Image: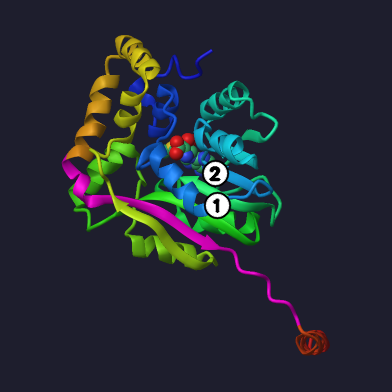
Amino acid sequence: MELSQNKRVADMNYFELIAWLGIGSSHPGGFPATKQNLAVLQILPDEYVLDAGCGSGLTACYLAKTIGCKVMGIDINSQMIEKARTRAEKEGVSHLVEFNIANVYDLPFPDNKFDIVIGESITVFLDKVKVYREFFRVLKPEGRIADLEMALLKELPVNLRHQMEDCFGAGTNPLSFEEWHNCLAEAGFQDVEIKNPQALKDNGNIVMNELKKDWVLIKDLTNKIKRQPTLLPRLQKNAGFMKRNRSYFGFGLIYGRKPTPVKLGFKDWVRQVIFRKKTNSSK
Ligand SMILES: C[S@@+](CC[C@H](N)C(=O)[O-])C[C@H]1O[C@@H](n2cnc3c(N)ncnc32)[C@H](O)[C@@H]1O
C-alpha cells in the first residue's frame, strides 16, 4: 500500500513529496554526479559504507552491485526505506545492503563502525556541524566522509532565500564552498577539500529532471496529478524557482578524513600517569 496516498500534497514536506513521487536520485547533478563522485572515491569491496539519508536507495544498491561492498542505508522517511528495501530485493543485493529508519543526528551505531559515510543532499537541510560530528563518531579512524551538496556560488538575496525555503522547506541552507569546507573542519575532519565542484548545468530542477528520464514515473505522475491537482502547481513552483535562479547554485563533494588517533609514546604515557596522580592527590 502506498503510505502517503491519503496525505494532501499541500501537507507534504519536500521529503514526503519526493518519496511519494518515487524519485530515485534527488540531489544536484542527479545520478551522473553520483557516478562522477564514486569514480574519485574508489571505494573498495571490503569497505563498509553508510549512506546517510539514502532516499529510495539508488546509490546504495548501485554501490553493492558494482563494487560488492556492504552498505547500510538509513533515512528518516519510512516510505523511502520501504522503497529502498524493495529496490534491493529487485536488484538482488539484499545480502549486501540493509536499510533502516534512523535520524542522522542520533545514529543507532557504535563509534568507529564505518569506513566511509556518503551523503547526497541531506546536510543542506540540517545543522551541518552537528550532523558531521555524528558522521565523525561512527567513522573508523582514517574513515572518509563524502557529502554531495548544493552550494551557493554568490550571495542569495533575502527574498530569494525565502522563496527557496518555501519550495524546499524551512531551514534549507546551501553554503558557499568555503563555508562547507569550514563546517567539516570544525567537526574534526582533516584533509578537507571540495571534490568535483561545479555549477548547475541544466535547469537545476532535480525532481523534474528525474521525472523526465523515467516513463514509469511520468505515467504514475499523470495519475497522481489527476488525484491531486495541486501537485502540478507545486512542481511548477519549484521548477520555476530553480530555472530563474540557477546562476546562484552549484554543487560539489565535501570530502574529508577522520584523523588517525595519536599513538602515545612511553614519555607521553609517563606524563599522563604523573598528571593523573597529581590531579587525584589535589582533590
Ligand atoms: C533530497 S533527499 C536525498 C535522498 C537521496 N540521498 C538521494 O540523493 O536521492 C533528502 C533525504 O534525506 C532524508 N532526511 C532528511 N532529514 C533526515 C534526518 N534527520 N535523518 C535521516 N534522513 C533524513 C529525507 O527523508 C530524504 O530522503
Q: Is residue 13 in view from this perspective?
A: yes
Badge 2 residue CB within 8 Å of ligand 1: yes
Tell me: residue 267, above or below residue 167: below
Please tell me how crowded label 2 is: few (under 14), some (14-19), or many (20+) other residues with Cα within 10 Å: many
All told, the count of numbered labels is 2
Question: Along the horizontal axis of the image, is 240 left or right of 56?
Answer: left
Q: Is residue 253 magenta?
A: yes
Give coordinates of residue 103: x percent, y percent.
57, 42
Residue at 19% across, 53% down = 157
Badge 2 marks a residue whose secondary structure is strand
What's the residue type where badge 1 is placed? Gln
Badge 1 marks a residue whose secondary structure is loop
Circle 1 residue? 42
Residue at 44% across, 24% down = 22
Mark closer to the chain start, 1 or 2: 1
Q: Which residues are magenta?
A: 244-264
Badge 1 residue CB within 8 Å of ligand 1: no
Please identify the residue farthest to the left as the structure is shown: 244
Tell me: residue 214, above or below residue 257: above
Circle 2 residue? 52
Please tell me how crowded label 1 is: few (under 14), some (14-19), or many (20+) other residues with Cα within 10 Å: few
Quadrant of the rendered image containing residue 86: top right
Residue at 69% across, 57% down = 112
